[in-house]
Amino acid sequence: MRGDPAHVGRMAGHSNAKNHGPVRRGQEMLTCSADLTRLTAIGGIALLLVQGVHGQSPQQFEVAIIRPNLAGTSAGTSFNVFPGGRIRITNEPVKLLIRAAFQIQNAQVAGGPAWLDTDRYDIEAKTGHPEKPEPNQFGPLLQNLLRDRFNLRFHREMRELNVYALVVEKNQKNGGKLKTKIEGEDTAMNTHSAPGKSQLVGTAVSMKALAGYVGNRLGRIVVDKTGLSESYDFTLEWAPDETSDSPVPFLATALREQLGLRLESQRSPVEVLVIDNLQKPSEN
């Protein structure tokens, strides 16, 4: 188990990353106009943001109340969407909001203040529209919230990073250990933690979404190369770190044994979001 990629790729790509492309300033790019497939990976909840549409509204929250949350990581996190245009985010660090807003993984966020990972917030927001917000609206909504309330400014760089490819095990056919989603299920990924064990319960989850989740856990970009186009239900259990005395395996081994998937190490140019400015949220 100690030789699994989970242990060698924790922070790969950070210390020796090189700039391999032009810098693109991002201050005016916070409201997306391009059609994108987005992934929200917020703490224990991940939501697949499907193909967007040009000019789709709402682009901004009508009102957003942001409060510090001092409960800590053990209290868990959540992202809930309700009819009446309401969104409730609980106990989330700002880095996770940035990941969700821009469809990126942990290793693609560079710079920023020390509290980026540690300070956690509860957010209650309304779009001003009566209908339940659609998944393809979350990206622009969160981007504008970060710009307006956290004064986020950034630019983008291309860096050569170590990445993992998520692939199907050779002896597994078409993701044999994965259960195809039930018709009508909502997409969700919920993480539960206990001493010596972490658990992920996924419903209607795409392999791209799972790859993003695993990448954020390992601190290295994970790209989906499974070739599996369906969405799946699954439960994944693993030891949160290599020093823990746990009855379950480390993450890379758990993927292989429980889901029939494995990680292959590769090197690839990756676009990174570099934070130029970020401030604690303005008053409500």
Image (cartoon, rainbow, N blue to C red):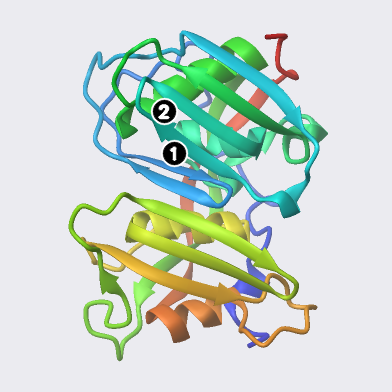
Front in this rendered view, residue 241 or 167: 241
- Amino acid at circle 2: Gly
Nearest to N terminus: mark 1 or mark 2: 1
Could you tell me which residue is drawn at 24 percent across and 66 percent down? 228
Q: Amino acid at mark 1?
A: Gln
> Which residue does the numbered mark 1 point to in the structure image?
103
Q: In this figure, which residue is indicated by the disc labeled 2?
A: 139
Q: CA distance from mark 1 to mark 2?
A: 8 Å
Q: Quadrant of residue 85?
A: top left
The residue shown at (60%, 76%) is 238
| Residue 46, above or below 124 | below
Query: Horizontal placement of 96 versus 135: left or right?
Result: right
Question: Looking at the image, is 69 positioned above or below residue 205?
Answer: above
Q: Does the rendering let one see residue 162?
A: no
**Percent of width and height locating residue 174:** 22, 78
Location of the N terminus (image quadrant): bottom right
Where disc 1 sits, the SS reads loop
Q: Quadrant of the C terminus?
A: top right
Q: Residues within 10 Å of mark 2 (few under 14, many from 20)?
A: many
Q: Position of residue 258 (x, y in %)?
A: 44, 82
Q: Are marks 1 and 2 in contact (CB under 8 Å)?
A: yes
